[in-house]
Image (spheres, grey):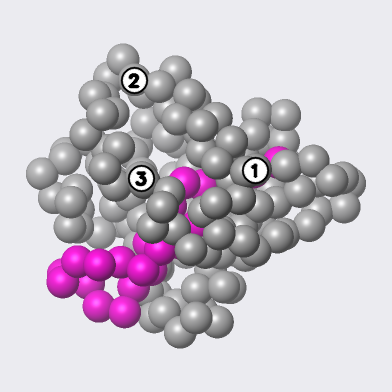
Amino acid sequence: MDEIEFVRCSGTNEDFIENCQLLDMDLDRRVGKVIKREKYEQFNQLDEIKEVVVVYVAGKAAGAGAIREYQYNDIDNATELKRVFVRDKFQGKGIGTKLVLELIKWAKELGYKKMILETGELLQESCHVYRKVGFNEIENYGPYVSMPESLCMMKEL
């Protein structure tokens, strides 16, 4: 496999922004007929994201993801995994797992004790990656409490 490079940056990175647009198109295609995604938009704003990792393979943007300090009172000292997506051409090569592990590493360096995330059972590949790296299902947290189609997970760091 070609050389993989992880670049830490912020939510203003153009490759990250493009990756998020591709993620939204993918989600619309995969779950848009089942889930009304508009209600999630308020939780996916990029202007609050300061810690982003873009993964490059042979110099080409292959995917990205982010962490963001969790701001609700129901879980302490946590960061939330956000906007993780590997572009179609690079899927199935273990890049998603390596990307999530890189984001976990950064979260530990920043002193977080827990990482949480929201996904959905319809996104089986994502759920597989998260379980593989040690995330376990938890009750829906914060803004997702009243969204039964959401699946929330947590990993102790």
Residue at 55% x, 59% y is: 10
Tell me the tag on residue 15. Answer: 1
User: How far is disc 1 from disc 3 in space, using C-alphas?
Assistant: 16 Å
Question: Is 62 on the left-hand or right-hand side of 13?
Answer: right
Q: CA distance from mark 1 to mark 2?
A: 24 Å
Q: Nearer the viewer, residue 19 or 154?
A: 19
User: The disc labelled 1 sits on which kind of residue?
Assistant: Asp
Prevailing secondary structure of the magenta residues: strand
Q: In the picture shown, does residue 66 fall above or below 83?
A: below
The residue tagged with tag 3: helix, strand or loop?
loop
Q: Residue at x 66, y 57 (%)?
A: 98
Q: Amino acid at mark 2?
A: Gly
| Upstream in sequence: badge 1 or badge 2 | 1
Q: Is residue 18 above or below residue 47?
A: above
Number of numbered discs: 3
Q: Which mark is residue 151?
A: none
Residue 118 visible here: yes
124 in magenta: no
Camera-side residue of 124 and 22: 22
Residue 68 is situated, as x and y percent measured from the top left of the image, at 40, 63
To which residue does mark 2 refer? 32
Task: Tell me whether the residue at label 1 lies in contact with that at label 3, contact meaning CB atoms closer than 8 angstroms.
Answer: no
